[in-house]
Image: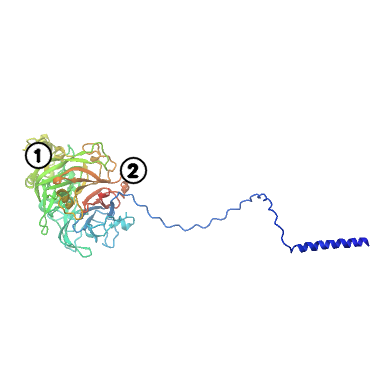
Amino acid sequence: MATQLAKTFSLSALTLSVIFALSACNGDDGEVGPVGPAGQIGATGQEGAPGQNGAQGEQGAPGLDGAATKTPGLTRIATVPEGAEVTGIFLNDEGDLFFNVQHPSDANSEVDSVNNKPINTGTVGVLRGVDFNNLPNSIIDSPVPKTANERQTVMAALGEYQVLGQTGDTFDGALPQGLGLIYNLDGSSLILENDMPDFNGYVSTGAGQGYLFSNWEELPGGMSRLAIEKDAFGSWSVTDSMMISFSDVWGTAANCFGSISPWGTPLTSEEWVVDSNVSSTTDSDWNDPAEIASNSRLGRMWDLVAPDTANPYNYGYIVEIALPLSDTPTPVKHYAMGRKENENSVVMPDRRTVYISQDDTGGVFFKFVADTAEDLSAGTLYGAKLTQDAGSTEPATTGFDVTWVELARGDNTTIRGWIDQYNGISSADYVEGKTSYLSVADVQAWVDGDATYPTEENGGGPVTAGQPMDDRVAFLESRAAARLKGATAEWRKLEGISINHDRALEAVTGTDVIADEIVTEAYLYIGIADLDNTMTDDEGDIRLSARVKDCGGVYRAKLEANYDIARIEPVLMGGTYRSSLTGAERCDVNQLSQPDNVIVMKDGRILIGEDGFQENNTLWMYDPKAQ
């Protein structure tokens, strides 16, 4: 019984404990106990396998090309088609810019929207629709050609190039002998189709109209005259055309660059194969039968006058197209200005002083001062003597002081009489080792002041042998005469020379002719296509380094009182010549490369045409103020 009671009591106590515990869940929470210390961090688990690469994103747009490294102030105005050089730059008073495409590749077949014809032969043209006398200070470059169309057409930064005429054009029958085609003197046979238009000279006959005279530079040479008119939108038309006859002056040879005189007459320059003596041992072989047969250009000069004989002293002069220009033009060869490889001549505003460049290896820079203003038939001829800056050979910084060596005074009539004494000399008169013309010994005797010419036994020419001395050598062998007299005969490809007439007039005389500018200094600019050979041979008066070499450069000469020149200095050089490379790469396409024609604009900027080995030669504009 007691045991039973004990069990009953134990069960009741347990039941009460459970009841009290259950009733505690519904009571207030007790205080939170303190946080225990953190347990140790577990070991790092193994790294999972790499996920797959995401898909490649789209390629971003190409960035802009970096700016080409280029001389400050140098702007690419235009490029000409493959195979061509830029020639005939001429800027008229109305702001029209003419230039030619000389000897382009005959494989060019691309056409443009303006002309709708390929430029694959000699081409005379103009940039229409722009006034180059009123240009902004900053102009965006025309691009370096890349596509076939760009490489085979004229690309321009301003305006549109309009073709005025091409080799062989007859202008709907108005010019049956064809533009640029050269015939013999009697017109009976075609000698060559000339694809080498050079100088352009525009003479106004009224607002928007005038005559465009263009040289054709080959042997024999020629000159054309196109009457042209401009409409209200700047487009040109040819209203008349002709090839000027040179039959009264025994034809003409390689009409190169030129100028328009201050009195409005074109001056064309005879350049090639005048056979002027260079060394102290070379005499003329103009009538050597073997030379005539092997030298196609010399042979064509003999064909020009056939069946008569060719006289070398008939060629190599500055030729003026005399007034009036509206009638049949009359060429006048100015023998008093000397016989040499003329690139061009520029008459100063005094209308008497003329500077003349000789384009050859070992050439001379000449000056002619006429006796009378606007009359180039008589005057005094000079050659420049250069003194290079001491201790300096770098082409970009080396200049030259200039003095003038007087050669002689002469006149056309007297010199023509001397020339006629060599008429009738044929190839049958040629003797190996001798000359039928003036010899180097003749020139030396003149320089030495001898009373008579040397005999044939002493190296004299047969025409003057033993005769009393005269001044013919100064005008018939001008380079040899200048060299032996002490002038510097070391220029290499002395090319175009140019002034701006109004700037020169204001700077020298103080006459106010340039609007919105006071001009106190004016320059004659000189293009040098190659700075090599006689300019870099470490001999004589010119001893430059060959760094620039065939890339060439531009010089300038300040015009002093009476339009004298006493100093020549570099103004712009091409890039460093890279002989390790070939083709166009030898000179940087973004720098000047073998400059030829140079024209000075009214605002002082200059236009420069290239005659180089670039794939597409460039017409540049350069601002000397950007130096």
Q: To which residue does mark 2 refer? A: 580
Q: Name the residue furthest top.
A: 458
- Classify residue 507 as left or right of residue 550: left
Q: To which residue does mark 1 refer? A: 462
Tell me which amino acid carries mark 2. Answer: Ser
Tell me which amino acid carries mark 1. Answer: Pro
Q: Can you give x and y, in whole percent of width and height, for residue 420 in the image?
A: 8, 46
Residue at x 11% of width, y 39% of height:
461
Q: Can you give x and y, in whole percent of width and height, for residue 456 in the image?
A: 10, 36
Secondary element at tag 1: loop
Q: Can you give x and y, in whole percent of width and height, for residue 215 in the image?
A: 18, 53
Q: Residues within 10 Å of mark 2 (few under 14, many from 20)?
A: few
Q: Residues within 10 Å of mark 1 (few under 14, many from 20)?
A: some
409 or 139, which lies in front? 139
Quadrant of the frame with the N terminus = bottom right
559 or 471, which lies in front? 559
Q: Is residue 546 visible?
A: yes
Query: What number of labels is visible?
Result: 2
- Classify residue 582 as left or right of residue 193: right
